[in-house]
Every structure is written in structure tokens, then in C-alpha cells.
Amino acid sequence: MSITLGQYLILSGILFAVGLCGALTRRNAIIVLMGIEIMFNAGILNLVVFWHYQHFATLTPQMFAIFAIAVAAAESAIGLALVIAIYRHYKSVDVDEMRALKG
Amino acid sequence: MNAAFWILSAMSLIGALLAISLRNLVHCVLSLILFFLGIAGHYFLLRADFLGAVQILIYIGAVAVLILFAIMLTRNVTGTEGPRELFGLGWWTGLGTALIVAAVVWVTVDSAPQAATRSPGQAVSSVEQIGKSLLNQWVVPLEVLGVLLTAALIGAVVIALEEVVRRR
Amino acid sequence: MEQLIHQQWLIPIFPLIAAAIQSLLPRKARKLSATLCIGAMAISCVFALRAFLASYGGAHGHEVEHHAERVFTTFTWFSFGTTDLTMGFLLDPLTAAMAAMVTFVGLMIFINATGYMAEDENFTRFFCFLSLFAAAMLGLVVANNLLMLFMCWELVGLCSYLLIGFWYFKPSAAAAMKKAFITTRIGDVGFFIGILLLYWQTGTLDLYTVDGTGALQQADKLAGLAGWWGLSMASFIALMLFIGAMGKSAQFPLHVWLPDAMEGPTPVSALIHAATMVAAGVFMVGRMFPLFIAEAGNWVMDVVLWVGCFTALFSATIAVAQFDIKRVLAYSTCSQLGFMMMGLGAEGLTGGQFHLLTHAFFKALLFLGSGCVIIGTHHEQDMRKMGGLRKYMPITFVTYVIGMLALAGFPGTAGFFSKDLILLNTFHASKLAWGLATFAAFLTAFYMTRQVFMVFFGTWRGGVGEQHGHPPSPHGFGAAHEPHEVPWNMWVPIAVLSLFAIGLGWWEHGYHHFVAPQEVIPADGKGMVMGLSVLVGLLGILCGWLIYGRKTLAHATDPDPLQAMLGAPFTWLNRKWYIDEIYDATIIYVTGVLGRFFRLVDKVVVDGILHAIAWVAWGISQVTRWVGDEFLINGGFDTGCESVRGWGRIFSKLQSGRVQSYFRVLGLGVALLFLLYYLK
């Protein structure tokens, strides 16, 4: 019995949930970014799974996936640069301490 | 083939879980790499060879290293974070949200009849095909992507630049 | 005469307008005030005389049978609902003669008053009150309506109050003004009951109406209705009205205010308490006469007769023993009013009303004369300190003697004719009353003679007297403390009045024909009565001369010869039979007790209820404050604000500034959306 679409989707769903949990729960900004990366990957996996199981004639989902990966990478670069800049200012990467916008 | 799926799934799942739960940041990154590997494996399993290679190259080779650099640059002395707020309101919110999402997805998928019966297709992608379509159909997005990456590069450099430079 | 009645309102209106203007004048406007007063009265006099002549002309028209008509007019004063309150004017012989007398005598008195009050600083106010009084009295006389009559009745009472207490800063004057008002008010209770009964039984307050429904026109109908106390309704009403007349005309027992009213200035005494206001009671009885005689043989007429008779005798006895020149005249007025009432009680309308007319002239003359004496002797009023004034004040002396003779009933004078008529009527009503009245006539002659001899004959006993700060009189008569004659504006009026005192009596027959032609004057015993009254008059003068004239008092402190003769009774008469003291001990005392009791009731019950209500209101307000204001409003409001602030505090935690918490909320929201989407 081969793996069904459903199983793959459940997998990517669980991975997405794990990434979401990490992003919402951890206090370290870098871990949060890591959680976001996990969520990204789960999403892109979803894309590829659908390409594989939906008999797409074109390579469009793959292209989408390639571009998504590229954008994700750019985004993580910017995010980490921000974290570094914030670290310089706050001397810590604890998100709980970054509440200058409070109120 | 199923076994590969299960092994790879376990790998990525464990990697993800560890990535968000370990105390030591570097350990987190390492398990993140494990996760990426698992995903790459899934890509290979799904006959998206190029994507799998790209995943390894980009995510593990660039993003994970970048995160490591960031950790190194933003270290606390011990490299660990401060006291955790385990079982705090935020923790429960996060967990709850995740669980809800997971549950919804699971149940949705279970209730969709197609998801159960769909069998994998025969689509194969080759690097040649991808390259050709990148430069024919997808050339504009490619170029835009180039611009985006350039912008991201410059932006990251500017943001992370030390203030010492500005004070001059 | 028809158009004249519609101008009848002109008679009282001028003094009223004058009073209104004078009330606004400053104190310095003395000449203006006096001019307005006298001018208004003169105009009213002209109109009154015109009305009189028109009415009299109707009486003595070309036809023998033609006699004076009675014309009247009414107007609506105000209406409420379906009933109207009307007022009206009347012109009949009684009114015409009375109005002419009031205006003319009033005019004389006003002129005299300019001299009497010349040194008083409240001159302007005095003439304002005089004008008001004149307006009210004339309104009373021309009224065709009991409401208007009563209003004017009360107004003259008010003016009497104001004028008696003109020098209100004197405690005796303040007491006298109150006494006058309150005593007449007691009588007015009866008057008012009478008016109410009349209105109730006849449905109208008009005396005469065109369709014969006037109160007096229904007298026969009322005589047929049964009243109380064995009387018909007409007679009972008459009795009640007579009680009012008793108060106003100072009949016993409500006479006590009249002597004390002498506290007012002498022109006031002349006008109000001799000629006009006190005569209003007699006039009112005369006006309401149809009610009095409607029921044949009722005992109200007997009451009137005996009250009058007793008052006449009683006051005459007191007058004999008085030393104040005005008190003698006051009691004399009281006595003469008693004569008038007695005459009316004997069913002699002519006699009573004619005596009223003549009495007004010579009593005003006497009072004004006494006023001249008082001014001439620099405000001396005790007769024992006077004497020999005929040398100093000849004009006053002559006119005063004329007045005295008229009052004593000296043959030929006005008083002789009118008093004689009364005595004749009384003779036919009750021999006893006639006898007592004749004795009172004797006393009248006696005390007047006593007064004249004490004041004008003998030697001047005033002598050195007190310092007055009185400047030498402008006409240079006598030195600063010697008596002097009065200026022309004081003796001319009394000279005019003395002419009437002599001559008016001869009009008796004309008056009878004019006012009450249907009345039959009994002819039996006329000669005997007349002769006896002349005799007692001369006898009284003789006794007066014997006791006071032959040997006049030498010094002011000499005892009164009569006192020496009578001893203790003299003191009793001098003290007015101790009536005031009796009243004080009984009625006043009881009233005082009641007053104190009610004051206590007021304090405890009424104030107690008031305090209780206030306390309850305060309590309610406190409760409302606690519950309503503090608890509900403040508390509610505060709680509301607090809860808003609390919720704000809670919600502001959402804006923590922490990205992760925003992210959490976002994620939770998306998850819930998924859930909802799935559940759909």
C-alpha cells in the first residue's frame, strides 16, 4: 500500500503545528525564527506533495516551491539581521523584553 | 517505500520537535538541520530531485549556518536562554493553538475522500526541464527573485551593520 | 334725572383720584396735596349739589302729586362662572341729601384742616388720607349695592384707623387706632352675616333693580319667610345689619372706641367721628329701612329704640363729667347718635335722618371750634386750664355758642327741630324711652353749657404754661403764651357752618316731604312734647349757668363744682362707668387667654406638624441621597468607571508591545477560524 495524499498532508499539518507552537511559545527570538522556518518548510512540502499526487502536467508547483524557498531564505536572512541589530540594542534576544511598543 | 516515508517522517518530526524544545540553542539548530534533512528526503521521495538538492543546499547550507552565526553573535555567556516560562499563559496559548490547527487539519484530511484514495502520479521532473522553464516561462519571476535577493542582501547588511560606522 | 344717574360715579371719583395722586407726592408738596384734596372735594360738592337739586326739583315739580323718584344703575364688576358680581349707583332723596351734606361739610372741614395741621410735618399724608376717606364715604352714600356699600364701609373704617393713629408714635394714639378698628370689626361680623343672609334669601346684593328683584324691593317677600328667634327673615337680617350699625355708630356696648378716637387730629374728629363716618351706621339703617319695617310689630325696632335710648342717656351722663374739651364732644356725639337710632327705632325715618343732617353741621362746627380753641391755646385740651377765651377768640366764641345752642335744642336752631321730631316719634313708641330721652336732652344742654362757661368765660387759667417754642403768631394777636384767634382758613368754615346750624332746621317740613312723604308724623301730643323739650333745654342751660357761669373756676387746680356737689358719683361718671375696665377684665382677658392658648396650639400642633413634615422631607432627602445619589449614581457611576478602567487594564495587556503575544493572538484567531470553518 503506497502512501496516500492524506498521510502526507497530515504530516505537513503536524509539522506546521509544531512550527507554530515553537513560534508562539519560545522566548528566544532565534528559536521563533526557527519555528517560522519549520512552518515554511511544512508549507512547501505541502506544495510538492500536491504536485506529486495531483498529476499536474506542468512544473508550476515546483517552480512555486523553488521561489518559495528562495524567498524564505531571504526572509530568514533579514530576520536574523534584525535580531542581531536588536541584540545590540537590548543586549538580549528575549522577546519578552522587547516591549517598547507597549500600550 | 513506505518504510522510507515513515523513517523520514519520524526524522523530520523529531527534528522539528527538538528544534523548538531544546534549551541549548546550538542543539536546537542542529536538530533543525535534522529536520531539514528529513524534508529533503521527502522531496526525493516525491520525485522532486532538484528541490531536494536545493533544500539541502539552501536550507542546511545557508539558512542553518546563518542561524548559527546569529546565535554566535547574540550569545549570552552560557549560550542558554533565561528562565523559561514553562506552563505560563503564553505557553498554553501556543500549545493550544498548535493543537487546534493540527486537529483541524487531521480531521479535514480524514474527511476528504480523495485524500485517502489518491495514488501518486508519474510526474517526473528533471533539472533540465526546470532549467528550461525557468528561463522561458519563468524568466520574469526569476529576475524579480534576483532583485529581491539583492535587496535582501543589502538590507541585511545595512541592518546588521554596527553603529560604529554610523557614528562617524 | 335719567342721565344724571349715569354720572353719579362722578361724585366719589374725584377724591379717589386725588388720593391716588397724593399718595405719590413727597412730603414737601404740602400746598399741592391740600389743593388736590380741597379741589377734588369741591368738584364732588358741585356734582352732589347738582344731583341734589335735580332730585329735589323732581320732588317739587309742577304737579302736586309728583314726588322724588329713585333712579339707579348697575354695572357688572366681575363675573365668575355663571354668577356676576354687580355694583351700582343710586340717586334717591336720602342719597342726594346725604351726599350734599357730606361734600359740603367735608369741604368746610378740609379748609379748616389746612390751618389746624399747618405746623405738622406729615401734612401731605394727612390730606391724602382725608381724600381717601371722602371717596370711600361718598361711595358708601351713593352705593346701590351691598357689596359696594360694605367695601366702602370697610374703607372708611380703614381711613378712620389711619387717621386716628395719624400720630402713631404716640402710644395712646396707636392703642386708640387699634381699638377703633377692632371694635367696629366686631360689629361688622353682624353686618356681614346680614349681607350673606340677604344674598342667600334674595339672590342679589343690589338694593334696587329695574325688574324689582332688588334686595330691598323683596322686603315684603322676606317678611313672609321665617327667620330665627321668633323673627321673620327680613327682621332677622335687619337685626344683623343693626349690629354693624352699632359698631360703626358707637352704640352701647360697642361705643368704647369713639372717645379714644379723639387721639386723632381734631379735623379728623370733626369729619369722621361727628359728621360722616359714625353717621354711616345711622344712614345704613335708614337705607335698609324697608327691611326693618317689613314685618309689622317685630322686636328689632324695639331693640334699635332701646339701644339708642340707653346710649343717649348713658353717654350724656359721662359727658357731664369730662375735662377734655374733645371728650365732652365725643360723648356728646355718642349720645346724639343714640338719639338718631332711637328715632329710627320709633319708626321715624324722617326724624332720625334729619337729625343726622343737622347734627353733622353743628357737631362739625363744634369740633372745628374746639380745634380752633386748641390751636389758639397752643395745643391745650384740658378745659380746666382754659377760660375767658371769649376775649381772645371772639369769632370762635360766637360760632361755638351757636353750635352749643343748636345741640342743646334751643328754639329756632336746627337741633331744636330735629330733636323735637325724634322726641315726638319716641313719645308715640314708648313713654319710658321718651322720658329717658328728655332727661338726656336736659343733660345735653347742661354739659354743653358747662363746657362753654368753662372754656370761654371767666379768666384765662392757662397762664404761663410750658415752653412751646412757638413763634409769635403772624397776625400779632396776643403774646407768645396767651391764646389768640385763629387765621381765616380756620374761622371762615365754622362761620359758614354756624349759618347752617341756625337755618337748616327750618327745612324740616321740606325734608320730610322730600325723603319720606309717605310717612305719617303723629300729631298727638306734639305741643306737649315740643313744650317739654324746650323747657328741659332751657333748664339745662340754666343749671349750667348756675353751677359754672356765676362763679367760674379761678385756677386750673380748683375742683369742679359738680364734683364737689356729687362726690363719688362724679368720679364714676368721669371714669366712663368703668366700662373699659370691665371689658378689660372680662372680654379682653378671655381673648388674651384664648390668644395665648392658640399661640400654644400654633407652636405645638401647627409648628409640630410643620416640623414633622420638614423632618420627614429631610429624612426622605437623606435616604434619597444615600440610596439614590451616593449609592446608585455615585456608586453606579464610580463602579461603571472602575469597571471600564478594569477592563481597560485587562485589555491593555493585549498591547504588551511584545511581538510574540501579538503573534499568539493572531495564531489563536486563525485557529479558531479554522475551527469554525470546519464546524460549518
Image (spheres, coloured by chain):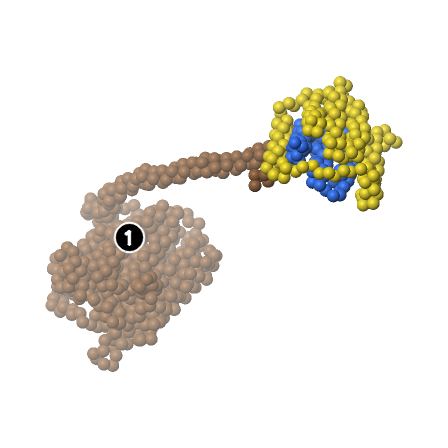
Amino acid found under the numbered disc labelled 1: Arg
Determine whether C205 is above or below C385 in the image: below
Front in this rendered view, residue A45 or C71: A45
Residue in view at x 14 percent, y 68 percent: C522
Front in this rendered view, residue C478 or C607: C607
Which of the image's four quarters has the N terminus of chain C? bottom left
Colour assignment, chain C: brown
Which of the image's four quarters has the C terminus of chain C? top right
Q: Position of residue C406 (x, y in %)?
A: 25, 63
Residue in view at x 36 percent, y 45 percent: C171
Whether residue A56 sits left or right of residue C284 in the image: it is: right
Q: Position of residue C371 (x, y in %)?
A: 35, 57
Which secondary structure, mark 1? helix
Residue denoted by label 1: C185
Residue in view at x 23 percent, y 60 percent: C200
Whether residue C537 sits left or right of residue C621 in the image: it is: left
Residue in view at x 16 percent, y 58 percent: C227
Determine whether C519 is above or below A13 in the image: below
User: How many numbered marks appear?
Assistant: 1
Colour assignment, chain A: blue
Q: Using the image, name the chain to which the residue with label 1 belongs.
A: C
Whether residue C253 sits left or right of residue B19 in the image: it is: left
Instruction: Using the rendered view, name the quadrant where residue C541 is placed.
Output: bottom left
Q: Position of residue C291 (x, y in %)?
A: 20, 63
Q: Position of residue A62 (x, y in %)?
A: 76, 39
Whether residue C29 sits left or right of residue C244 in the image: it is: right
View extreme (top): residue: B78
Colour assignment, chain B: yellow
